């Protein structure tokens, strides 16, 4: 593992961790105003973006070549850095469409999916990487 690449993934992890902890703070809330829903979606988008980037940096520090978010997810699943590869790919697809979601019922559905399906993925990645650093 090259020292520079190791430092890079650890720095990216710190950014991911900060965003993840913010999402963790609010995701269990029962009711959300429209503003809170928008905020939760925004925090999810940021955290997910940092998640695939920390995967990419980690993989590169391990000697793998990764060129896209999809490749990062697939390779991370392959080496068992993450579980539920299909749900990660689904989350990736959702992340790409959240920018264009303005329909109230779609927003509520997305908040529910983030809470029930996608947050546990981010939590598992956070826990795995935290263990890796210990």
Image (cartoon, rainbow, N blue to C red):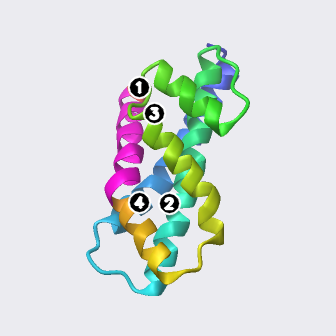
Q: Which residue is mark 4?
A: 114
Q: Is residue 134 left or right of residue 86?
A: left
Q: x, y percentage for residue 43?
A: 51, 64
How many other residues sit within 10 Å of disc 2, few (<14), some (14-19) or many (≥20)?
A: many
- Residue 8 higher or lower than 97, as above or below: above
**Callout 3 environment at 10 Å: few (<14), some (14 to 19), or many (20+)?**
some
- Name which residue lies at 48% across and 41% down: 88
Q: Nearer the viewer, mark 2 or mark 4?
A: 4
Pointer 1 residue = 132
- Who's the residue at 62% across and 61% down the image? 97
Distance from disc 1 to disc 3, alpha carbons, whole Å, reads 20 Å
Q: Earlier in the sequence, mark 2 or mark 4?
A: 2
Range of magenta residues: 116-131
Secondary structure beneath dot 2 equals: helix
Of callouts 1 and 2, the N-terminal one: 2
CA gap between label 3 and label 2 equals: 18 Å
| One can see residue 5 in this view | yes
Q: Nearer the viewer, residue 60 or 111?
A: 111
**Image quarter in which the C terminus is found:** top left
User: Which circle marks residue 44 in the picture?
Assistant: 2
Give the mark count.
4
Look at the image and say whether residue 118 sits in the magenta stretch.
yes
Could you tell which of marks 4 and 1 lies nearer the N-terminus?
Answer: 4
Can you tell which mark lies on residue 85? Answer: 3
SS of the residue at dot 1?
Answer: helix
């Amino acid at each position: 593992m090259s020292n520079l690449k190791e430092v890079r993934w650890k720095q990216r992890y710190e950014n991911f961790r900060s965003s993840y902890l913010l999402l963790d703070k609010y995701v269990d809330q029962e009711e959300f105003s429209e503003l809170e829903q928008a905020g939760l979606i925004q925090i999810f988008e940021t955290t997910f973006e940092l998640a695939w980037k920390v995967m990419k940096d980690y993989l590169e520090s391990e000697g793998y070549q990764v060129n896209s978010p999809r490749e990062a997810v697939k390779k991370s699943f392959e080496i068992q850095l993450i579980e539920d590869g299909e749900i990660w790919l689904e989350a990736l697809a959702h992340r790409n469409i959240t920018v264009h979601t303005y329909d109230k019922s779609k927003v509520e559905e997305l908040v529910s999916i983030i809470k029930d399906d996608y947050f546990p993925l981010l939590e598992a990645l956070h826990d795995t990487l935290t263990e890796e650093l210990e």
